[in-house]
Image (cartoon, rainbow, N blue to C red):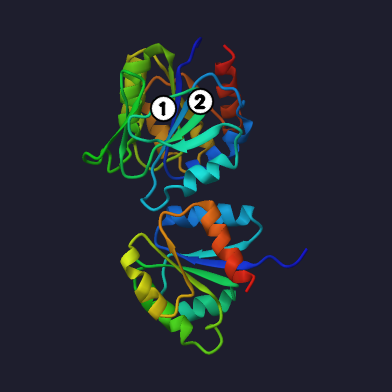
Amino acid sequence: MGKAKKVFVFDDNADILDLCTIILEDAGYEIKTSSTSNHIIDQVTAYTPDIIFMDNWLPDVGGIDATRELKQHETLKNIPVIYFSANNDVESLAKQAGADDYLSKPFDIHELEQIILRHLSK
Amino acid sequence: MEGCKAFIIGGSAGSLDVLLKVLPVLDAALRFPIVIVIHRKHGTDSLLPDLLSTRTKLKVKEVDEKEELKAGFIYIAPSDYHLLIEQDGTFSLDYSEKVNYSRPAIDVTFQTAAEVYRDKLVCLLLSGSNSDGVNGLKSVKEWGGLAAIQDPATAQVAYMPAQAQLKVAIDRVLKIQQIGEFINLLSNS
């Protein structure tokens, strides 16, 4: 058995964080969640995830700015960032900020697992 | 109770863990539908029914407008709508004002179901941090149905079932591990 891949989910919706935690742990991932993108570099550096999910509406620093900050960071820029939002107007903004992919809310378990597999197998 | 026609579960904070423990215990051939109304924020549609369906042999689905209730299904109230049960045994979804700061409100589903199923209804209130569902359980009793709560001592957030216990003559107080068996026994009686 290899070491479990680590997923970091940023969302201010506690229900999403609860559900993602159970679903991804079921699927064999290690997961950490956060409801704020404040000090994003410190948070991500401390956990060193294999993939990041970033919500659009986050208090303090919004998801777009947090994504840009990660993608401009020397050592963290290669971690895939999946942007997710219920507002599809932000997809192009997220990609401009450096997001590697986009997941439209609401999404189902299959979509969540597939997008992780796609990016972790690259 | 003989001939139970619907089993409705209401819950809020701390209720998801209970559902994940109860669903695997349920018989695949339940003779009545289960309806689940839990407070959750918009954006979790699909995920919650998907997750619950991984824990049960019963069919799990989010409710569609005007859908008919059928035995063998577990129905999940969509986020952001009140879930009503109509006299013809169908669901309706309602976007009117929040009740108890909640939409869906557990009270709304319990109360409308109480009038439809009367003494063939069981409603169960789980863990939660407000008093939604308490008035609903009162209605269930008034129409002859059976009111049950999760034992507050086993609830992550005891307030909701504890309020029900204070204000309603509760018929059954169930520990988490008793809930699934209670539902199965109802189906066999």
Quadrant holding the C terminus of chain A = bottom right
Q: Residue reaching furthest left?
A: B97
The location of residue B106, given as percent across then percent down, is: 35, 34
Q: Are marks 2 and 1 in contact (CB under 8 Å)?
A: yes
Q: Image point 34% across, 17% down: which residue?
A: B116
Q: Is residue A61 visible?
A: no
Secondary structure category for the residue under label 2: strand
- Residue at coordinates 50% horizontally, 65% vertically from top-left? A9
Q: Is residue A70 left or right of residue A24?
A: left
Q: Chain of mark 2?
A: B
Residue B113 location (% of width, % of height): 35, 22
Name the image quarter holding residue B132.
Answer: top left
Q: Give the farthest residue toward the top.
A: B2
Residue nearest the viewer, comparing A11 with A105: A105
Q: Which mark is residue B165?
A: 1
Residue B62 falls left or right of residue A59? right
Label of residue B173 in the image: 2
SS for dot 1 = helix
Q: Which amino acid is tagged 2?
A: Val
